[in-house]
Amino acid sequence: MGKIAALRCVSCKAEYDPDRIEYTCPACGPRRGTLEVLYDYEGLRREVTREVFAQSGDASMWRYLPLLPIDGMAHVQPLRVGWTPVYRFPGLAKELGLSALFIKDDGQNPTASYKDRASSLVVIKAQERRKPVVTCASTGNAASSLAGFAAATKLETVIFVPETAPEAKVAQLLVYGARVFLVEGSYDVAYDLAARAADAFGWYNRSAAVNPYLVEGKKTGALELAEQLDWRPPDRVFVSVGDGSVVSGICKGFEELRRLRWIESVPQVVGVQAEGAAPIARAHARYDGRRVEIEDVEARTLADSICVGSPRDIVKAVTYVHAAGGRFVTVSDAEILDAMVFLARRSGVFAEPAGAAAFAGLRKLAAAEDLNGTSAAVMVTGSGLKDVAAARRAVGRPIVVEPSIEAIREHL
Ligand SMILES: [Zn+2]
């Protein structure tokens, strides 16, 4: 069983032996019965200190190996994942009424998205379990990330993406050598098909939420942010939300640091959803601390990475954010595009629409409330180069000129 103490169902709290269960709680089913990985926190507190990480010298998320559910470094791929930069922007912070603004740029991961943190871990799990084929459904980033990390191993990948997935993400999949199925239908349809195919053919499933180890990779963004800011995380952390796994991971990361007494308190995590795809924000608003009411929607937003109508990690996302005293904000597509351009022009960080959504959420909150000199971090979860068509919509086309100084002068 290794270092994992148990896998626990987020709904009925039943605990399972990780050697005996692969995906979700049989009693609660795949939607409500997502599992969380529990460790022996008392033991960890005795054995591991913050100094261990500082001394590790590993500039990747694997510096947190003692807090991750793998047996060792044997199957870790050579690609460098995590330990992405945190930038400070004092001028922007002041404009927004903040004491400090930090941008953590996960577009700098090997396949240019936050999803690499989860994919690298699942590729290791597949090898530990001797599964030769991994599969997943994805709006795009999780798939290209899985294909990239599997390419560094002998694993084969079979990918299901909605036929509307951005071209750059599909091209990325094919370049990495994945077998790609463009599914006629939405991401939610592709998700169900991937689960059925994994079941029918015995493939290891990396689709969001169903695999309990994904959130473990995704929590490393929180661990890094805390360590990079000298174990004093900001007052608020903004992150965009689709299936709910990344926001769950970030909450879990901070909560584990608090349990280990490496940080004093957890920041307020602010989940940002697109107005046209906000079932988790709505469920959180209705949540009374007992049962998460799930109401799916027909998702519509240009931020393809968070265009999710049937979020699979909704129970985790709502309960974790609630437990941490966090909140949700929704933003329109126009606000997302505006935030994407504003962020790029003022910081040099080019985020894809979903990544920019988190910044749009911060701007919206800053306009509506006095942030009162508090500090905030924004997780940029994917590179803008992943979805050039969306960027074009925001900025239009450049000027075409004949090659002469006179022609240029006319346009100045
Ligand atoms: Zn259960």
Image (spheres, grey):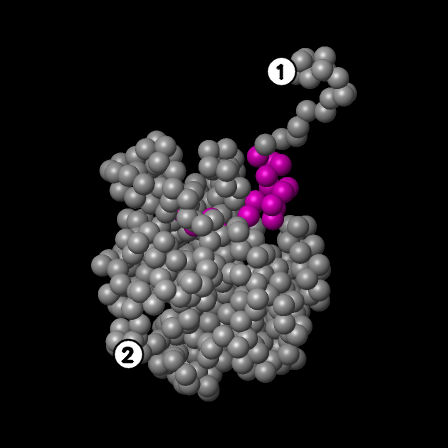
Task: Look at the picture and state if 124 lies above or below 261.
Answer: below
> Left or right of 315: which side holds 409?
right
| Circle 1 SS class | loop
Amino acid residing under circle 1 = Leu
How dense is the environment of label 1, judged by Cα within 10 Å: few (below 14), some, or many (20 and up)? few
Task: Look at the picture and state if 389 lies above or below 346.
Answer: below
Quadrant for the C terminus, please: top right
Q: Quadrant of residue 34?
A: bottom left
Image disc number at residue 412:
1
User: Residue at left 32%, top 61%?
Assistant: 254
User: Depth check: 319 or 384 in front?
Assistant: 384
Amino acid residing under circle 2 = Gly
* Image location of residue 177, percent across then percent down: 71, 64
Looking at the image, do the residues carrying marks 1 and 2 touch, with CB atoms under 8 Å apart? no
* Image location of residue 104, percent across then percent down: 43, 49
User: Depth check: 100 or 268 in front?
Assistant: 100
Q: Quadrant of residue 127?
A: bottom right
User: Residue at left 60%, top 41%?
Assistant: 390
Start-end of magenta stretch? 378-394
User: Depth check: 179 or 33 in front?
Assistant: 179
Q: Is residue 207 visible?
A: no
* Image location of residue 379, percent across then percent down: 43, 50
User: Residue at left 30%, top 65%?
Assistant: 50
User: Residue at left 46%, top 53%?
Assistant: 84
Q: Earlier in the sequence, mark 1 or mark 2?
A: 2
Query: Label 2 belongs to which residue?
Result: 43
* Image location of residue 263, percent across then percent down: 26, 60
